[in-house]
Image (tube, grey):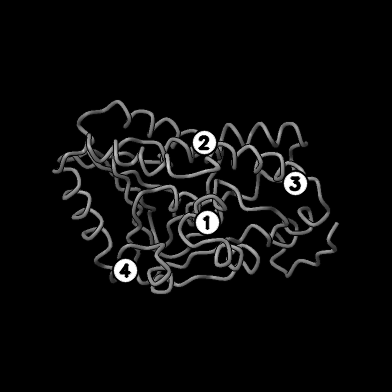
Amino acid sequence: MSVALLIHDGIATVTLNRPDKLNALTDEMYARLIAVFAELAGDESARAVVLTGAGRGFCSGSDVGGMLKTDMVEGRRRLQQRHHRMIQSIAYLEKPVIAAVRGPVAGIGFSIALACDLIVASETARFSQIFKNIGLIPDGGSVFFLTQYLGIARAKELVYTARMLPAQEAKEWGIVSRVVTDGELETAATGLAAELASSATYALGLAKKMFQAMYVPTLEMLLETESLSQSLARLTEDHREGVTAFRDKRKPKFTGR
């Protein structure tokens, strides 16, 4: 299964399971994540969640195979029903969610990690807002989350440069809670989840809602602006060139059109 769920001793482990593609998300995986987190919302046996990826990477972004196939109206609908519902299902789960990440944490994969409450990273983890490389804007609420974590200046640096942010630097910037060796990742994330699962999780859920109440504009307001902007970006020559260059394994030649 492309997204696996295991619940044991109060901890739900959700695993992106497409390691041959660095867990790049397909339509089916978006739908499955939405369904899994909806299930966890009503499952009292799951008191804390670890979200991770199989293989050597957490998530390298969306699968580019489905791009260039939608018009503006369809593109906006898909963004709202796939990316946005998935991100909201993670961010608004009234239980602690820990991202356990290694290797590439890129594009929508970075957004997913940011939507979690805490990030535990392997020393191999590398974070990137790679959207501009295929002529798109950040989606999955990245601008919203990054601004909360970093402020506008550093958020702009990551978005505008699309550079890889190493795990240790991400910790120094306050994005990552802990950096551990690659072999310790699962143990560290599960140990933190067990600590949270054994605590007053209803109170933690209420605290989570209080943190969310601090954000103005809200995530929903940002996602609406994002859906309109991304729909326009998908119509540009730069987006087509970015996707084509990615498939051809060459550097894109952008024209600003």
Which of the marked residues, 4 or 3, is nearer the chain's N terminus?
Answer: 4
Instruction: Give the residue number, with chain letter if any, for mark 4.
Output: 179
Instruction: Give the residue number, with chain letter if any, for mark 3.
Output: 234
Which of the marked residues, 4 or 1, is nearer the chain's N terminus?
Answer: 1
Is the residue marked by circle 1 packed among few (<14), some (14-19), or many (20+) residues within 10 Å?
Answer: some
Q: Nearer the viewer, mark 1 or mark 2?
A: 1
**Residue 54 spot, x, y in % from top left:** 38, 54
Q: Nearer the viewer, mark 4 or mark 1?
A: 1
Residue type indicated by callout 3: Arg
Which of the marked residues, 2 or 3, is nearer the chain's N terminus?
Answer: 2
Residue 7, image quadrant: top left
Q: Secondary structure at mark 4?
A: strand
Q: Residue at x 73, y 70 (%)?
A: 251
Q: Residue at x 74, y 45 (%)?
A: 68
Query: Mark 3 and mark 2 in contact (Cβ < 8 Å)?
Result: no
> For the residues marked 2 and 3, what is the alpha-carbon distance in whole angstroms?
21 Å
Which of the marked residues, 1 or 3, is nearer the chain's N terminus?
Answer: 1
**Horizontal arrangement in the rendering, residue 27 relative to residue 240 (left or right):** left
Instruction: Give the residue number, with chain letter if any, for mark 2.
Output: 28
Residue 170, image quadrant: bottom left
Instruction: Look at the picture and state if 29 lies above or below 167.
Output: above
**Residue 91 spot, x, y in % from top left:** 42, 41
Which of the marked residues, 2 or 4, is nearer the chain's N terminus?
Answer: 2
Which of the marked residues, 1 or 2, is nearer the chain's N terminus?
Answer: 2
Q: Residue at x 83, y 54 (%)?
A: 237
Instruction: Give the residue number, with chain letter if any, for mark 1.
Output: 147
Residue 91 - label: none
